Amino acid sequence: MTELHGSCDERFRPLELLMRANQESGLDEGASLAVTLNGRPVVDLWAGFANTARTVEWSRDTLVCVFSTSKIMVTIPILMLWDQGLIDLDAPICRYWPEFGRNGKATITTRQVMTHTAGLPGFGRAISAAELHHWNTMIEIIENAELWYEPGTISCYHASTYGFILGELVQRISGRPFARYFADELARPLDADFHFGITDAGDRARVAGLFWPDLSTAVLSPTGQRLSSEVEIEDLSLPAAMATVSPGGRGFGNARSMARIGSMLTLGGELDGRRYLSSETVREATREQLYAEDLMFGPMRRGLGFGLDSKEFPAPTPTTFHWGGFGGSFITMDSESGITCAYAPNRLLSGDGRPPTSEPVMGQIVGDRFNEWWRTIGDVSRALS
């Protein structure tokens, strides 16, 4: 029987059983799972291997790249600045960042970026790893990029541009680079082991190697295929790759740190007596802002940077808000039940390898492992209600 390390409250045993089953079936190599209930840890589990040679066991403090689950971590700083009255989500971004308005982008608002309707889902050209390593280079590319669609008219997931646009806004408004602002205002106060731009050798040694999928089996729309080919895939075990700050897709953490940050949102913006966001801001961010056909994912119901429950892509519960990342990481937050759940694997899966029965939708892209996690989280939530 596979050995799981850590602890699990008996009420959440179905999640432990699912994690064990995934380990024993080979769906997972290494992974961490964490759940908080009303801000208090009730599940903290880890298992498997942290390197592709299968010689190093996953430890309590192993980190892993969680890809687009990182978007939650760039969404929160924008919400903090909005909460403080430092940014107007409906004002043109070029009010704070004049150069952004080039090539027809003068009317794009922050709200449109957060709902993936800004009309700039990609850079419009191939991006090399060398370019990605330099923040100022990427910002200049975005400044000179041309619109794909008229802002506000089309929903299309802003896979890579999301993090750079919002990250630069954080820097322009706060006067601090995004990674520093995140560390100062969120990670350190919350004691959350989540990082952008890892440069410390000790932290680099904790980052798990990745088991990549066969990307030829991915179920993607034509737009998704175009976006996926824009950014060069590189070895994320290299120091330069780990040091790269790409807020929308290259955060490094574990389930414990993600659940810690997510539980602040679950509890309406306050955790352990410290308020990070007003409850009004959290309510606005997690209410429906858009329910539309996304050119990459199919029908999506969205808040400000969060996915919401819909018939096409059911969340664990109707009141859950969430997001996930390539390969299978995710955070789910439910203010009604008080449950926050996070999962961080290093075996990356891209769908289940089967062709779609219709136009691609989110559930077909993320695959059966992801869907089974969400069904189980929902079952546990209902059992506790």
Image (cartoon, rainbow, N blue to C red):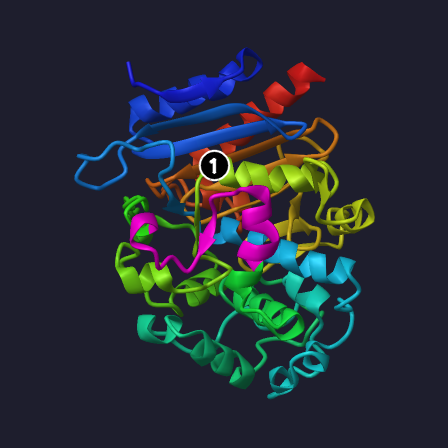
Determine whether, in the image, residue 125 is placed left or right of residue 258. Answer: left
Task: Tell me if residue 317 can be seen.
Answer: yes
Is residue 24 depicted above or below 99 in this figure? above
Q: Is residue 93 magenta?
A: no
Question: How many numbered discs sit on the rendered protein?
Answer: 1
The N terminus appears in which quarter of the rendering?
top left
Pick whichever, 241 or 317, lies toward us. 241
Percent position of residue 365, x then y: 47, 46
Instruction: Look at mark 1 in the image and give the residue it sits on.
Output: 255
Task: Tell me if residue 309 can be seen.
Answer: no
Residue at screen point 31% across, 51% down: 204
What's drawn in magenta, residue-wise?
182-203
Is residue 213 depicted above or below 102 in this figure? above
Pick whichever, 48 or 185, lies toward us. 185
The kind of residue on which mark 1 rests is: Ala
- Report helix, strand or loop for mark 1: helix
Percent position of residue 9, x then y: 53, 15
Instruction: Categorize mark 1 by other alpha carbons within 10 Å: few (<14), some (14-19), many (20+).
Output: many
